[in-house]
Amino acid sequence: MSTTGKNGNTIISADSHVFEPVNLWDTRLDKKYRERGPRFVVDWQGKGGTWFVCEGAQPRSIDSIAAAGVPKEDLVKFKNMSFKDLRPGGYDPGRFVNALMPDLAAPDQKVAGLHVFTFNEIEPTERWRQEMLARLN
């Protein structure tokens, strides 16, 4: 989604379009919590598509998450969506920025910066952010 700020700059929000890598909790969550932790489950309890499942939370089909900004009449296209149907830029930050690169680098866009908000991964995220900004120059 994007909007124009009070100063005329375009603000692009990607927070509602980004997914965790499908194996995030299988590989990064402490082993003692993995069975109870969040995860993506294909065809959860016989229901089609990929589901976000976590102990203590109502399971959600990713078709309800992956459609941020999609007009209501187009939501049917997302029914029973699988993780593999998502755009790779939705879960791979490098591919996400690569897809944005032509617009970010366009002189008429006047991009002033790139902000990345992260949890508990400040140093690696900052290194990645600097690498992506360097590619714009």
Image: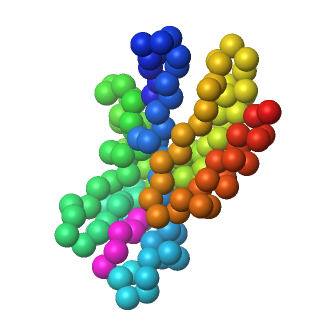
Q: Residue at x 73, y 17 (%)?
A: 107
Question: Relative to residue 126, is residue 43 drawn left or right?
Answer: left
**Residue 43 placement: quadrant:** bottom left
The answer to whether any part of residue 84 appears in the image is: no
At which x and y percent is residue 1?
45, 28
Question: Relative to residue 14, is residue 69 drawn left or right?
Answer: left
* Residue located farthest toward the bottom when viewing the structure as drawn: 32
At which x and y percent is residue 19?
47, 52
67 up-or-down from 45: above or below: above
At which x and y percent is residue 88?
60, 49
Q: Residue at x 35, y 69 (%)?
A: 38
Q: Residue at x 59, y 36 (%)?
A: 114
110 up-or-down from 57: above or below: above
Along the viewing direction, whichever of 34 and 120 lies nearer the viewer: 120
**Residue 127 placement: quadrant:** bottom right
Along the viewing direction, whichever of 64 and 20 lies nearer the viewer: 20
- Give the magenta-colored segment's residue range: 36-41
Along the viewing direction, whichever of 52 and 131 lies nearer the viewer: 131
